[in-house]
Image: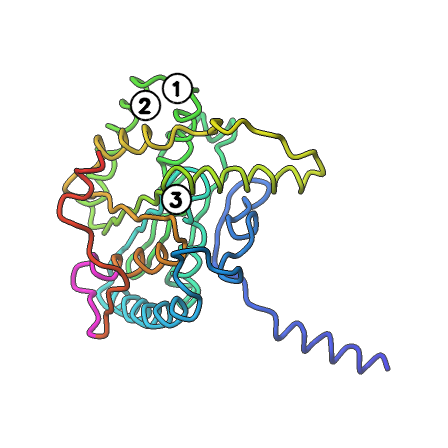
Amino acid sequence: MAKKKSKQAQAGAEGAPAKLPIEATGDAAPQSEDSRQGDEDAAQPRAGQLRKKEYRRELGGLQVDLFKLQTWLVGEKLRLVVILEGLGPAGKCGTARRIAEGLDQRVCKVVMLEPPNKRARARWHFQRFVEHFPVTGKMVILDGSWYHYPATAHALGLTSAAEFEEFLRSCAEFERTLVLSGITLVKFWFSAEDPEQDRRFRAHIAALAKKRQLPVPTLPKDAHPLDVATVRQTVLSLTNAGQAPWHLIPADDRRRARLQCIAELLSLVPGARPASYRKAQPAPAAGQVADDI
């Protein structure tokens, strides 16, 4: 009887999904958006949301092309850094997982850093990220980059506009240095419209309260934890440089956002456009970033 149970346990372990190569620093890994709010792939689609069957079909084709991108990176011995940014639960984590899940963990790594502790704040701000940069033939996806925590602090009113603008200018210089050193840098900013962003914030707060067994706070209808629009406008206006421009991803529908991000990544990396590349979303209108600033 004991042998039978051990075989069943072994079969269950073999059938368990493998963990993705996500790196985190600190005492514990930060919670992903999927684990905090539930995987929306399993939920019933809301009005206008891309249906699961169509989403899976498009995602499968794009992941095949991502594998071709991986082969090209290894063959050309290039270094690729992909930044996924956006304040609050914008859909960055789910997108990073969909990009990495079909790739070799030795080639593609997802890095998601925790808020800087006292020791990290005493160091150069960019040093935390430099140590995770790829060597030749490798790819790193930053789920939240050097922008994330300073931008969140500014959105909460913890830093002045002058301090934040000076920080952004240092980001532009830092990215220019990266590009000149031979790193291919691709930046995506995920942004949902205010009603959807507000819904996600409130769901996130309710999930945190439930996890800690606390009463769910009743927020006023006009309460919004972060000034997302102002921060986004400031970041885009000061760091949308020619060597590392931002690419906006509408994130009201998480499924469409993931597909569009992967499709644009495939089209933006020079020389890596596979023959079977399929654009999952219409190309953004010319000057879309400029219109949004």
Magenta stretch encompasses residue 271: yes
Which residue does the image show at 56% across and 68% down from the upper left? Answer: 17
Badge nearest the viewer, 2 or 3: 2
Judging by the rendered image, the residue that carries numbered circle 2 is 164
Which residue does the image show at 52% across and 26% down from the upper left? Answer: 118
Judging by the rendered image, the residue that carries numbered circle 1 is 159
Say what amino acid the circle numbered 1 marks: Thr
Question: Real-space Cα distance between discs 2 and 3?
Answer: 24 Å
Rendered position, 12 above or below 174: below
Image quarter of residue 30: top right
Q: Which span is picked out in magenta?
A: 266-275
Which residue does the image show at 44% across and 66% down from the upper left? Answer: 52
Total tally of numbered discs in the picture: 3
Labels 1 and 2: the sequence-earlier one: 1
Q: Are marks 1 and 2 in contact (CB under 8 Å)?
A: yes
Judging by the rendered image, the residue that carries numbered circle 3 is 131
Which residue does the image show at 30% across and 49% down from the upper left? Answer: 249
Question: Real-space Cα distance between discs 3 and 1?
Answer: 26 Å
Rendered position, 131 above or below 158: below
The front one of 251 and 141 is 251
Checking the image for residue 40, the label placed there is: none
